[in-house]
Amino acid sequence: MKNSYISIVSGLIVLALTPAVWGVGAADNGPESERWIDLAGHRVPIVKDGLYDRYRSNPPLSEIAKESPATDLTWFNTLDKTRVDMGFESYSPNFYYENTKVTVIYTADIHRLRELLPDIVSQQVQPLQIWPGRGLVALTAYAYHYCDNDSYNEISLAIVTSKPGSLNLGPVSLINQTSDKDYWGYVLKLPVDTELARVRGVVGYNLPKWLTTIQYKEKSASLVFDIADADTGEVDFTLETVRLTDLDEEPTLVNNSFINIDQKGELTYGYAIFRHMLYGSTLDDDAVKLTLGNGSFSKYLKSLQLGEMLRYDYVPSFQSALYAPKPLAELYQTPIH
């Protein structure tokens, strides 16, 4: 029976929760390579004369075309930005033009996953159980090479959940989400390596972000992400994944959605649309090497009792549009696509 469940889940395109957010602030003088802004009461360094410094998350696409003429902007030309209040003024959606990500789906202890969902959240969604005692988590590493808030790296750990308002039918729910290309989750951890990404994610999206060092390296046959422990500065864990060669080059759109709690204690949902440009997947667990250490994130991962790797997705080229969060009640009134 376990093998049949694995076969069903193999159709899942991974849930990968989304990047950080960014807003408007007044700049003052700083070092030559950076300047400082006030963002929702936080003093935040930004890249001097960078994309965010000049345009505050709303750059003209004509400027992107000048700076990066090889970037395909056809999809972004179909999307409209609107000004929003997210605890600071910003624009929705935020654009990510040139990026790389890898995602690994692991089984995890279903009882532990249920414990990690706040009560108010568990009334709306539940971890998907693929066989008795086992749920799913998605570990995703992002390298945002060129986006509205310059560049940064990010690591996401999320529980794969049912969709709000839908029955939790385990593997059947996975099949339905795959058919709709609309994947749901609850984000557990989301470290980033710039203060701009951290503040915007915490204030604007109520996401569990903190600042730490994340090193991204491209080797001839693999991609490597080294994640440092924020307290010690030492490498906590390393995710190394194979660069797959049999890739699909037909762009495809996928929705990744998440539920969380805002600063008023109310339920919200957010989502990002991903445009995968180059992508491939495998069920071969030899394609992934996760080396855990003794830092806080590693200890957290160990507490989940990670089991079999069910799927590895390699996406060396993708684009994304991240939308501002909305009250969860609106989801039941209007579809998100």
Image (spheres, rainbow, N blue to C red):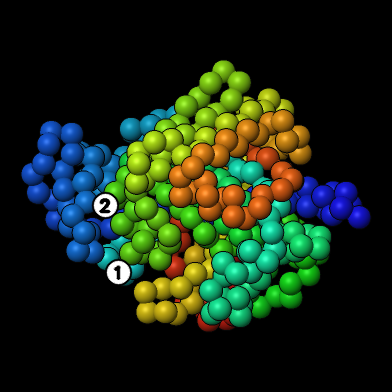
**Nearer the N terminus, badge 2 or badge 1?**
2
Going by the picture, which residue comes out furthest to the top? Answer: 220
Q: Quadrant of residue 42?
A: bottom left
Residue 87: which disc?
1
Residue 86 placement, left or right of 119: left
- Farthest residue toward the front? 294
Quarter that holds the C terminus: bottom right
Q: Could you say which disc has been placed on residue 310 in the image?
A: none
Q: Which residue is mark 2?
A: 56
Residue at horizontal 61%, vertical 43%?
103
Q: Position of residue 239 (x, y in %)?
A: 55, 36
- Left/right placement of residue 5 relative to residue 321 reads right
| Nearer to us in this view, 21 or 310 | 310
Q: State the count of labels.
A: 2
**Can residue 77 be seen in this snapshot?**
no
Q: From the top left corner, tell me how far across and down residue 321 is, in percent.
A: 47, 53
Work out whether 330 lies above or below 20. Answer: below
Q: Is residue 144 left or right of residue 198?
A: right
Residue 245 in the image: x percent, y percent?
68, 25
Q: Amino acid at mark 2?
A: Arg
Residue 224 is at least partly visible in this image: yes
Separation of marks 2 and 1 at Cα, in angstroms: 15 Å
Whether the residues at callouts 2 and 1 have beta carbons within 8 Å, the answer is no
Q: Position of residue 73 (x, y in %)?
A: 46, 41
Establish if 79 lies above or below 236. below
